[in-house]
């Protein structure tokens, strides 16, 4: 499709595709990594400053060196030798609710920083390729200024920037809206019911706090932002952030990534703030998810709930594309693999092996969260013991359950529930010397955790839903020597990547999980090896570093593409200029479309305004007054040029003094006169019956679709049907029309946004306007040439030839760069036709003579020349470039010079014109 003529880029060198750009970026990353690796071989004295030895740190918490690697270390900046490499690092602002460290206060101005627990922190700690700063909440309330200053200073050393949230905001935003509303909903647990109903009542105040908290995050980002920075927002806590950031600075590169699942649109629909949240996220340039399924759900929420267009690339709204894609996170696998060689880890392994000698050990590591399916896991283990009494003293389940979100009542309840089940099972199957379940309500340090991962025989992950689940990755990374078995919930994002090597289970099916435990414990060595090998390969190649680099690279590419795309969108109509020129001139022509131009905007969801009585297009009531004024102005001619049938235009406009052109100009009438036809005489309509059959078939099978028979075209409209079903049906319908029995007829099958229209090839608004103008000039007995044309409409691409109709005749002072590119041949014929518009007295009606019309467009123009009486020497059009305004309404790409966003803006424009006679 041609772009905006004013921005015709056809002469530019071919721009690379997105894939080409991404591949190039990938090559560059590889090259940069190669440079890095070479540096790693430099003498150790030059390395120390920027490559801290993580594995020598003894504790998972307070791991200062680890944090240094999150970002390019500052000492790197002081190293002259590495200047080139360093300068290529992109500044990255990572914004997440939780900082990688949580703060514990020790005195008025003294703070201790501890590593935060959770997959998001683990994933982001692996991000090393950028010059990174973290912005987030330190997990603590700091009401006093001294405390805030001291904490900010302590965090600064870790390149972290705090967002201070007071207790009430944390309560309403974090415990309330994030963890009691969004978290359960996104994990298919649903919204609060029964005893949680009180939460529903406070929903609005929690949402307000959520927005307020997001704004506070935005303020801190704005304070630290430097031009060119990439701002990467994380997770469901910050869905409002992209909008806050873009409102302030539309040029900021903003990405948003969700670490949890994004549920089916049917679940998201339940959320009272569903629209606002989706819209805010869409303000980002790039939106990422762990899996293709989550991305697909998000796109479908945008199409079904917001009524936007979903494309394979993302979601489009008024020409703005938000790119949506899957970026599965990984871990810093090397860090885990290397840790296994550390003496501390080896010591832990020895102790564990001794402690559990003679027993197989199964491992569970989860935050104590209802989504992790801990009760289901324990119940399945109980069933296994029940059914396999011979295993009772030979297997033990070690469950690490890290306390989390302890202020939220649901989490408190879960703790007691789990304790109760564990107690019961240990009582039932335990002995004086051994219990089958070892349950720990606390976190472990990094070395203990690695040792546990390495020595255990089976890892049991039974999440009911889980964005990714990094524990499964970490387990695989640490099992290179033992080759233990991973039992993995099919509802964890990790199932998509590790599914082939793991035993996949439905955690709700206790029987299935129990038998999988048996299968895993008895699995022969060669099968374990094969499965492990497959997973290990994936874990070491899909790292957190790779994840971040890919996301940021795609964000950069998305921005470039957006800039290219913007060039194809016409600029907004300069209303003041259009009005000013209008008031200066004396013979003005307004050509107005009808549907979606002078009618209320269609509810794209087909829900609200989809009552049957709304189906007929109606002139907006707020347009009646300005339209009447314009029609009654002797210096103005108003023409409504529409695809609609005659009766529809009659119903809406009979009371106004204007011109009506129905069926794309095939019928014409001044409201004081009768309808005339401008239809070429030998326009073949033989195809109508067969197309009618097809349309009827699809109308029957597509609820709330309509089928309209006009005299020169047939239209099947599905704007009130289910968006996705309608689109699928339209695809089938089009395929049939293009390849079926009528494929050879001389027809045009015109695809609208929510419609399919079939008409004869010769019928377009641009083809009709010449004849219409001739008739208007003749009928009005115009003496003065038309010196102002405003042509606005929500026209189909095929009908946009109306915009170009006037272009070639504009005087040559229009700068070459903004003049439309019309092929020479076409130009000649149009210029030829313009001769038809020379005025003469005693003219004969062009329409009266329509018998002699030929179908060929060029011939038509010259036929008109013969029939319109001309007034010696004067032209119908005397149009200066600046007095011609072609303007599309609610179209993302168009050949028009300008655009208006919606029919609301048409109202504004026509009111202004009406007030400036
Ligand atoms: O910060 P908290 O409220 O204590 O919760 C900890 C984190 O839990 C969630 O982690 C998710 O991210 C992981 C990495 O992408 C993913 O593997 C896992 O499936 C998710 O549950 C949460 O999304 C984070 O924001 C929290 O920080
Ligand atoms: O005592 C512990 C137990 C777990 N983890 C880490 O917590 C993360 C859990 O991430 P996952 O993606 O599995 O789930 P999430 O908790 O983020 O939902 C993993 O990186 C674990 O190494 C930890 O730091 N300390």
Image (tube, rainbow, N blue to C red):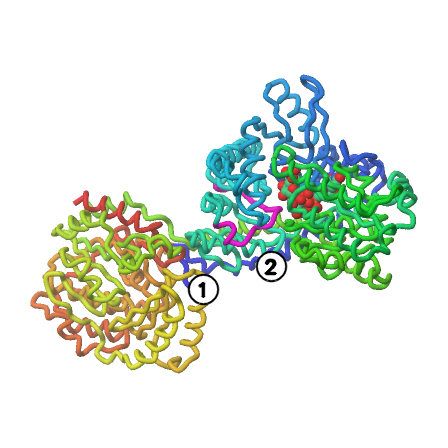
Q: Nearer the viewer, residue 457 or 806?
A: 457
Instruction: Sort mark 1 into few (<14), some (14-19) or many (20+) by Cα contacts within 10 Å.
Output: few
Q: Position of residue 204 (x, y in %)?
A: 46, 36
Secondary structure at badge 2 equals: helix
For label 1, the SS is helix
Q: What stretch is highlighted in magenta?
A: 250-269
The quadrant of the rendered image in which ligand 1 is seen is top right
Q: Residue at x 64, y 53 (%)?
A: 25
Residue located beneath label 2 in the image: 20
Residue 90, disc:
none
Q: Nearer the viewer, residue 565 or 492?
A: 492
Which residue lies under the disc numbered 1? 725
Query: For residue 85, what is the image quadrant?
Result: top right
Q: Is residue 303 magenta?
A: no
Q: Does the magenta stretch include residue 256?
A: yes
Query: Can residue 424 be seen here?
Result: yes
Q: Is residue 839 above or below residue 202?
A: below
Q: Position of residue 340 (x, y in %)?
A: 85, 45
Residue 90 visible in this rendered orientation of the protein: no
Residue extending farthest front: 428
CA distance separating discs 2 and 1: 33 Å
In the image, 375 versus 803, the foreground residue is 375
> In this rendering, would 6 be left or right of 176?
left
User: Does residue 703 lie above or below 474 as drawn?
Assistant: below
């Amino acid at each position: 499709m041609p772009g905006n003529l004013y921005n015709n880029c056809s002469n530019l060198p071919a721009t690379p595709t997105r894939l080409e750009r991404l591949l190039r970026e990938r090559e560059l990353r590889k090259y940069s990594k190669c440079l890095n690796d070479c540096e790693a071989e430099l003498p150790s004295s030059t390395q120390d400053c920027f490559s801290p030895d993580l594995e020598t740190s003894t504790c998972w918490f307070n791991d200062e060196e680890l944090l240094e690697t999150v970002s390019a270390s500052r000492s790197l900046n002081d190293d002259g030798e590495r200047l080139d490499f360093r300068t290529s690092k992109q500044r990255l602002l990572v914004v997440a609710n939780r900082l990688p460290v949580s703060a514990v206060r020790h005195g008025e101005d003294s703070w201790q920083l501890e590593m935060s627990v959770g997959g998001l922190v683990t994933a982001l700690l692996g991000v090393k390729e950028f010059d990174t700063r973290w912005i987030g909440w330190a997990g603590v309330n700091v009401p006093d200024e001294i405390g805030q200053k001291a904490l900010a200073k302590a965090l600064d050393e870790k390149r972290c920037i705090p967002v201070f949230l007071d207790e009430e905001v944390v309560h309403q935003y974090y415990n309330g809206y994030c963890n009691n509303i969004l978290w359960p909903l996104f994990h298919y647990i649903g919204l609060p019911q029964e005893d949680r109903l009180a939460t529903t009542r406070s929903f609005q105040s929690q949402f307000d706090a959520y927005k307020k908290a997001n704004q506070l995050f935005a303020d801190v980002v704005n304070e630290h932002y430097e031009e060119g920075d990439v701002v990467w927002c994380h997770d469901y806590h910050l869905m409002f952030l992209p909008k806050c950031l873009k409102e302030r600075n539309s040029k900021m590169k903003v990405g948003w990534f969700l670490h949890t699942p994004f549920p089916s649109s049917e679940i998201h629909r339940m959320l009272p703030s569903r629209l606002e949240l989706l819209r805010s996220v869409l303000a980002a340039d790039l939106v990422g998810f762990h899996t293709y399924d989550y991305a697909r759900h998000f796109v479908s929420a945008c199409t079904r709930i917001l009524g936007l267009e979903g494309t394979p690339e993302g979601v489009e709204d008024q020409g703005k594309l938000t790119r949506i894609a899957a970026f599965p996170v990984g871990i810093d696998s090397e860090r885990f693999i290397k840790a296994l060689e550390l003496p501390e880890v080896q010591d832990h392994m020895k102790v564990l092996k001794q402690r559990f000698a003679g027993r197989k050990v199964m491992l569970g590591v989860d935050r104590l969260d209802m989504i992790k399916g801990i009760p289901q896991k324990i119940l399945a283990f109980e069933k296994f013991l029940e059914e396999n009494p011979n295993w009772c003293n030979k297997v033990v389940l070690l469950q690490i359950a890290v306390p989390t979100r302890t202020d939220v009542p649901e989490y408190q309840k879960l703790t007691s529930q789990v304790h109760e089940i564990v107690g019961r099972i240990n009582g039932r199957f335990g002995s004086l010397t051994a219990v089958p379940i070892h349950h720990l309500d606390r976190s472990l340090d990094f070395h203990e955790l690695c040792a546990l991962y390495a020595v255990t025989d089976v890892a049991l992950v039974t999440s009911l839903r889980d964005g990714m689940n990094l524990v499964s990755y970490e387990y695989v990374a640490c099992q290179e020597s033992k080759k233990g078995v991973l039992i993995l919930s099919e509802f964890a994002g990790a199932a998509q990547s590790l599914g082939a090597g793991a035993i996949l289970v439905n955690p709700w099916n206790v029987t299935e999980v129990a038998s999988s435990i048996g299968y895993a414990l008895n699995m022969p060595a060669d099968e374990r090896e094969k499965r492990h090998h497959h997973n290990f390969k994936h874990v070491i190649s899909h790292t957190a570093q790779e994840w971040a680099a890919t996301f940021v690279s795609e964000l950069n590419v998305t921005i470039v593409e957006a800039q290219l795309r913007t060039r194809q969108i016409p600029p907004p109509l300069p209303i003041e200029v259009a009005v000013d020129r209008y008031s200066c001139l004396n013979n003005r022509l307004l050509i107005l479309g009808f549907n979606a131009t002078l009618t209320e905007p269609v509810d794209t969801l087909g829900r609200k305004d989809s009552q049957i009585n709304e189906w007929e297009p109606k002139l907006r009531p707020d347009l009646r007054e300005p339209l009447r004024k314009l029609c009654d102005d002797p210096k103005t001619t108003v023409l409504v040029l529409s695809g609609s049938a005659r009766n529809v235009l009659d119903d809406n406009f009979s009371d106004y003094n204007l011109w009506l052109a129905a069926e794309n100009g095939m019928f014409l009438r001044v409201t004081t006169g009768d309808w005339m036809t401008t239809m070429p005489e030998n326009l073949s309509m033989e195809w109508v019956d067969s197309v009618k059959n097809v349309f009827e078939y699809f109308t029957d099978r597509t609820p709330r679709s309509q089928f309209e028979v006009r005299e020169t075209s047939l239209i099947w409209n599905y704007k009130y049907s289910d968006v996705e079903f309608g689109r699928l049906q339209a695809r089938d319908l089009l395929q049939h029309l293009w390849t079926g029995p009528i494929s050879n007829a001389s027809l045009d099958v015109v695809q609208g946004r929510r419609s399919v229209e079939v008409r004869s090839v010769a019928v377009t608004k641009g083809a009709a306007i010449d004849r219409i103008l001739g008739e208007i000039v003749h009928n009005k007995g115009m003496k003065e040439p038309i010196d102002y044309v405003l042509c606005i409409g929500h026209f189909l691409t095929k009908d946009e030839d109306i915009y170009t109709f006037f272009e070639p005749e504009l005087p040559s002072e229009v700068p070459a760069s903004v003049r439309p590119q019309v092929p020479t041949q076409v130009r000649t014929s149009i210029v030829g036709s313009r001769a038809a518009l020379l005025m003469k007295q005693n003219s004969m009606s062009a329409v009266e003579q329509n018998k002699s019309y030929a179908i060929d467009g060029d011939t038509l123009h010259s036929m008109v020349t013969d029939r319109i009486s001309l007034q010696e020497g004067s032209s119908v059009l005397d149009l200066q470039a600046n007095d011609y305004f072609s303007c599309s309404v609610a179209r993302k790409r168009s050949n028009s010079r300008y655009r208006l966003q919606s029919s609301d803006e048409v109202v504004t424009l026509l009111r202004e014109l009406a007030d400036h006679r």
